[in-house]
Image: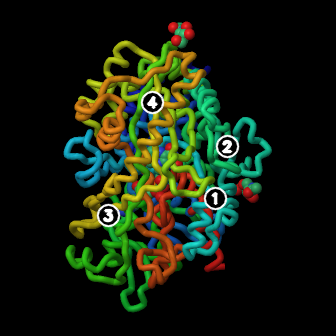
Amino acid sequence: MERPLSLSLLLSLLLVVLASGQRSQKTQTRNRNGNPSPELDDLRRLGLGNIINVPLYSDVPQSHYDFIVVGAGAAGCTLAARLSENPQWSVFLIEAGGVENLVHQVPVLAAHLQATASNWGYLSQPQRHACRGMPQNQCALPRGKVLGGTSSINYMIYNRGNKRDFDGWAAAGNPGWSYEEVLPYFLRSERAQLQGLEHSPYHNHSGPLSVEDVRHRSRLAHSYLRAAQEAGHPKTDYNGESQLGVSYVQATTQKGRRHSAFRAFIEPIRQRRRNLHILTLARVTRILIDGATKSAYGVELTHQGRRYQVKARKEVILSAGAFNSPQLLMLSGIGPEDNLKAIGVPLVKALPVGKRLYDHMCHFGPTFVTNTTGESLFAAQLGPPVVKEFLLGRADTIMSSIGGVETLTFIKVPSAQSPPTQPDIELIQVAGSLASDEGTALAKGANFKPEIYTRMYKDLADRRQDHFSFLIMHFSPASVGRLWLHNRNPLEWPRIDPKYFSAPGDVEQLLEGIKEAIRISQMPAMQAIGTRLLDKPVPGCESFPFASDDYWRCSIRTLSYTLHHQVATCRMGPESDPTTVVDHRLKVHGMRRLRVVDTSIIPVPPTAHTNAAAFMIGEKAADLVRADWS
Ligand SMILES: Cc1cc2nc3c(=O)[nH]c(=O)nc-3n(C[C@H](O)[C@H](O)[C@H](O)COP(=O)(O)OP(=O)(O)OC[C@H]3O[C@@H](n4cnc5c(N)ncnc54)[C@H](O)[C@@H]3O)c2cc1C
Ligand SMILES: *[C@@H]1O[C@H](CO)[C@@H](O)[C@H](O)[C@H]1NC(C)=O
Ligand SMILES: *[C@@H]1O[C@H](CO)[C@@H](O)[C@H](O)[C@H]1NC(C)=O
């Protein structure tokens, strides 16, 4: 007989998993025959095995593989899954983090994952022109450290980019990367279930990665969408013919649960694919390179205190992400001559690794209060009934809200020099704020000083006052940062200095974005729900008249919030371009049998969030590798 559903059991399990990011990662290092923990047994008995499914990914390395893929993130999982479709090829996928648990699958808890062992937890160098709301002006730079990489801890927004982005890559000397040529690779991975887009030529319905509407929507989102239209922004599919306009967000979720690169590409093939070996909790420390032939022939890694050398018969492929791929290149002697000399790594090949770093910087806010009730996201709503329904498979509750993100609006700003079809700013509308989780995960994830919550948002939480916020995101920053190593210890952080807002024009474009959000808030559909600007001044900006241009400029430099779209640290381009690291086939210039396949190759910031591009790059790289070795 089935045991009756014990609600307290389910809840306590959720809490156990929540509280023990670290511990549950460790339990997954046992071999495939290890005993699952008692909680998991309980869940399986309840028929919830599929939700928690704790697979064990601890294949002991063999001495040789055809391909070694370093890093199981969005691009790495995609590439490893595609390459191992060929049964003649053996593939070894190495990941520094552990395996996802139940919490990763709950979209509303996205911010909480940044407080677990699934986040590398980097901080930026102190910023001179930004991040003033953070201790020492250090912005948080989270990155996924788990099978699935950053796709397992991100906000799940699915967004590809503007046609011009990719046409620009191609025009810069990267044949094969124009929009027309990359669209098939976006489509290859997509399995869309989007209302009204069933027949769109811009969406596929049979790929491995699920893309869906978020089925929980607040009234605030509906009112905002109408107001944006009233303000002249047409309703659009931002992944379709034209980005400009307003859309409900498209999410990488499946039936209301996070669909990461791991869930989409690895989990479904794990049992059958004998030629794909996967090792988690394993840190690659160096690429093995034959200096005479400049050929990569393997990697060195540490796993549970042991050091291994694993050889690649065909290629070593770095998919360690925009911070760690450049780090590994430099640790292996490929990078700027001066940096390598300073840390005592013998030079193999001088290349501008890490010399450029672009990101998408946002302003956190403005926040608007409304006279609705029960529409905003508050932690208290995640009570036992909702948790139970989620565990039983419901996909339309607040648990499936992707951290509160509901709509995206792609706009042009008056001062823009960019072509008319290319948006400059994105307005990301969120049904909440730092009040949603009472100043905990979201504020900590951004490294905001506590007074930002206590002075601006606590009152909203205390009164459970409905409200919504914007993240205003700037697509084409003129500020350029960089990344370097300060010593040769592979277990230390690279130094990351994004130099946010070092170009003042970036602040001005965000200011124009803020003004447009305020203009939309004054449209009839917003006024009908009593929308007004939250008028609690930003700590540190009190000396400026509230909501004046200078006030907002101060706010932009204080409530600086990155959307974590770091790119270009291993920039793609022709060898004749001295700013580039890999060619259009993603091969490291001047090296043999070594590629980089992840978002670090993106040459300039795209007009989009970067996760979809990571999947596309993985798909396309698989074809490039196949073409070279078949
Ligand atoms: C908090 C957050 C929210 C975001 N929200 C969105 C969003 O809503 N939509 C969107 O499009 N984008 C979003 N992004 C960005 C997007 O998720 C990333 O750009 C994208 O997933 C990066 O993919 P990748 O394959 O380049 O690298 P990653 O997915 O970061 O993969 C790199 C992998 O390599 C592993 N690794 C690194 N070094 C080593 C080593 N030495 N040895 C072994 N393994 C190693 C890492 O642990 C990681 O698993 C978000 C990012 C963050 C941090
Ligand atoms: C949709 O995805 C499947 C599976 O990846 C692929 O075979 C098919 O070609 C894709 N369709 C389009 C139109 O790209
Ligand atoms: C909300 O505000 C609008 C506009 O001021 C008003 O018409 C409406 O009655 C208000 N609703 C409530 C519930 O207060």
Query: Residue 278: horizontal and vertical position, in percent?
Result: 49, 59
Left or right of 278 on screen, residue 189: right
Residue plotted at (63% across, 29% down):
230
Disc 3 element: strand
User: Which of the marked residues, 2 or 4, is nearer the chain's N terminus?
Assistant: 2
In space, the residues marked 2 and 4 are separated at their CA atoms by 22 Å
Disc 2 element: loop
The three-letter amino acid code for the residue at tag 4 is Ser
User: Which of the marked residues, 3 or 2, is nearer the chain's N terminus?
Assistant: 2
Q: Residues within 10 Å of mark 3 (few under 14, many from 20)?
A: many
Residue plotted at (49% across, 71% down):
572
Q: Is residue 168 above or below residue 398?
A: below
The three-letter amino acid code for the residue at tag 3 is Leu
**Camera-nearest residue between 406 and 112:** 406
**Camera-nearest residue between 4 and 609:** 609
Disc 4 element: strand
Give the labeled residue for mark 1.
163
How is the structure coloured here? Answer: rainbow
Q: Quadrant of residue 625?
A: bottom right
| Labelled pair 1, 3 in contact (Cβ < 8 Å) | no
In space, the residues marked 1 and 4 are separated at their CA atoms by 29 Å
Left or right of 157 on screen, residue 467: left
Residue plotted at (72% across, 35% down):
195
In space, the residues marked 4 and 3 are separated at their CA atoms by 32 Å
